[in-house]
């Protein structure tokens, strides 16, 4: 090989290497552009997730408030049930006992009256019997 041919050969090799490097650089630029696009998409999705998480946190806070209100209401209901039970035990039960005592007294009076009635009926029957015989 002649020196001129060698230089040409070297120049061609260098040009080929440079062309390959240029192609590789274009590929790298394309890859970087794709990565930027994907990163933008990921950032958008992360933003959407953050919004959804914020919404969920708000809803959980609302549920916590509602549960707290329910617990308060349950305590109120429990107190009212205890008051009602005490009223039943202390006042209504007393009233029922008093009514039972009054009814017992009335029953005794009715029993006395029935006995008097039975005696009167027996007397009337006896008088009717005597009257019929005469």
Image: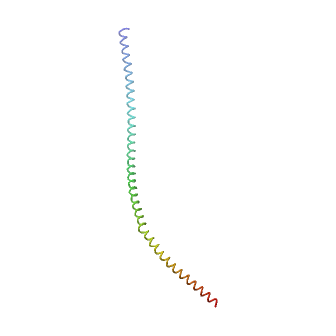
Instruction: Report the side of 96 relative to 2 (left or right).
Output: right
Q: Along the line of sight, which residue is nearer the eye, 63 or 24?
A: 63
Q: How is the image coloured?
A: rainbow
- Using the image, determine if residue 53 lies above or below residue 85: above
Locate residue 130: give its quadrant.
bottom right
- Using the image, determine if residue 24 lies above or below residue 119: above
- Of all residues shown, which one is farthest toward the bottom? 134
Q: How many marks?
A: 0
**x%, y% of residue 53?**
39, 44
Image quadrant in which the C terminus is located: bottom right
- Using the image, determine if residue 51 lies above or below residue 96: above
Q: Along the line of sight, which residue is nearer the eye, 39 or 68?
A: 68
**x%, y% of residue 4?**
36, 10
Image quadrant in which the N terminus is located: top left
Residue found 45% across the figure and 71% down from its top: 97
Locate residue 124: give its quadrant.
bottom right
Residue found 38% across the figure and 24% down from its top: 24
- Using the image, determine if residue 35 lies above or below residue 109: above
**x%, y% of residue 7?**
35, 12
Q: Along the line of sight, which residue is nearer the eye, 127 or 50?
A: 127
Residue found 36% across the figure and 11% down from its top: 6
Locate residue 2: give its quadrant.
top left
**x%, y% of residue 33?**
38, 31
Q: Along the line of sight, which residue is nearer the eye, 82 or 26?
A: 82
- Of all residues shown, which one is farthest toward the right? 133
């Amino acid at each position: 090989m002649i020196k001129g041919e060698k230089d040409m050969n070297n120049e061609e090799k260098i040009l080929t290497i440079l062309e390959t490097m240029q192609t590789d650089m274009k590929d790298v630029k394309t890859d970087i552009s794709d990565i930027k696009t994907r990163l933008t998409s990921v950032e958008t999705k992360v933003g959407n997730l953050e919004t959804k998480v914020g919404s969920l946190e708000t809803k959980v806070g609302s549920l916590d408030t509602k549960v707290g209100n329910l617990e308060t209401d349950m305590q109120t209901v429990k107190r009212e049930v205890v008051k009602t039970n005490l009223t039943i035990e202390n006042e209504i039960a007393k009233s029922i006992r008093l009514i039972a005592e009054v009814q017992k007294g009335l029953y005794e009076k009715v029993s006395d009256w029935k006995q008097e009635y039975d005696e009167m009926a027996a007397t009337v029957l006896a008088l009717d019997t005597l009257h019929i015989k005469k």
